[in-house]
Image: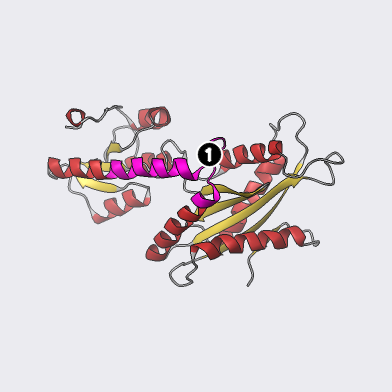
Amino acid sequence: MLAPLGYRVLAVTSGRELLEQAADMRPDVVLMDANLQDLDSIVVCRKLRQLRAVSWHTPVIMITSTPATKQQRLAALEAGAWDYLSLGLNAEELLLKVDAFTRVKLETDHLLEEDTEPASGLYTKRGLERRARELVSDAFRRHAPLACVALSVEPDAARAPSGAAAASPGVVDFASRVLQASGRASDAIGRAAAGEFLVLAPSTAPAGAEQMARRLSRVIEGAAARPAGLPPLRVRAGFEAVGDLHETPLDPASLLAHASTALLRARATDNGSRIQRYEA
């Protein structure tokens, strides 16, 4: 049905093949059997998102040959599917959904090209602001948690050579690549200033935000494959997080600003605490 309408259709025969080849295929939409023979389809869908085999805005539609239960639908949506359909649906309806979802994906691709830095792939300030609006709106509707973690990366004064430049291009490039590789597929990572980064973390409560800040700090500071000449690094972090955005409303601008304010406090403290939560 799809090829005559201009779609280039690539088919795989198992969940393992999909996980192995999706990143190279770079699909604009994924239609997946809800009853794969080799792997659990819900697990495959979740791994597609977690492993960044497809982008967060790539539609995944799961199709079942049996009547779908409410539990199956909810499990698929929770795993990152955009829809869970029965083969009993009208073919025209399926094609219209694929067309609508694909248009959304392609339009998002276009916006991301404008909202990300070409070299690093990180969000620009405008891109972070746009993504923050989307995530705040989504978390408010779902009564979900949301967090923003701000990180500063600079040479460790105690171990770096005298005169090592703070936030040099090499430091920024290295930190950008580490964050891209270490972040979750759902996270939105962007540059705030020279040597400073912001991570928008959906479905992340305060405890998870602090854990994320510690994990990313350790990854950057402890990375073994540092380029030659790059000094030892020191990371400080600040974060803002709410457990239920509907109960504790927070506008997008405040979410970003609070994390940055907490980072300033972390950089100014002398008590050894390098991670600070925002305090009004």
Q: Residue at x 51, y 43 (%)?
A: 116
Quarter of the image where one finds residue 97 = top left
Q: Which amino acid does the dot numbered 1 rest on?
A: Gly
Q: Nearer the viewer, residue 132 or 149?
A: 132
Instruction: Tell me which segment is drawn in magenta.
Output: 101-127
Query: Relative to 197, is 65 on the left or the right?
Result: left
- Measured as percent of width and height from the top left, residue 76 is found at 32, 48
- Measured as percent of width and height from the top left, residue 15 is found at 34, 33
Quarter of the image where one finds residue 102 = top left
- Measured as percent of width and height from the top left, residue 109 is found at 40, 40
Q: Residue at x 65, y 63 (%)?
A: 261
Q: Residue at x 41, y 39 (%)?
A: 48
Quarter of the image where one finds residue 136 = bottom left
Query: Relative to 1, is 46 on the left or the right?
Result: right
Q: Nearer the viewer, residue 58 or 88?
A: 58
- Measured as percent of width and height from the top left, residue 198 is found at 59, 52
- What residue would you read off at disc 1? 121
Picture quarter with the N terminus: top left
Judged by its main secondary structure, the magenta piece is: helix
Picture quarter with the C terminus: bottom right
| Secondary element at tag 1 | loop
Residue 33 among magenta residues: no
The vertical placement of 201 against 184, above or below, is below
Considering every residue shown, the one lying at the far right of the view is 162
The vertical placement of 235 against 29, above or below, is below
Q: Residue at x 61, y 60 (%)?
A: 259
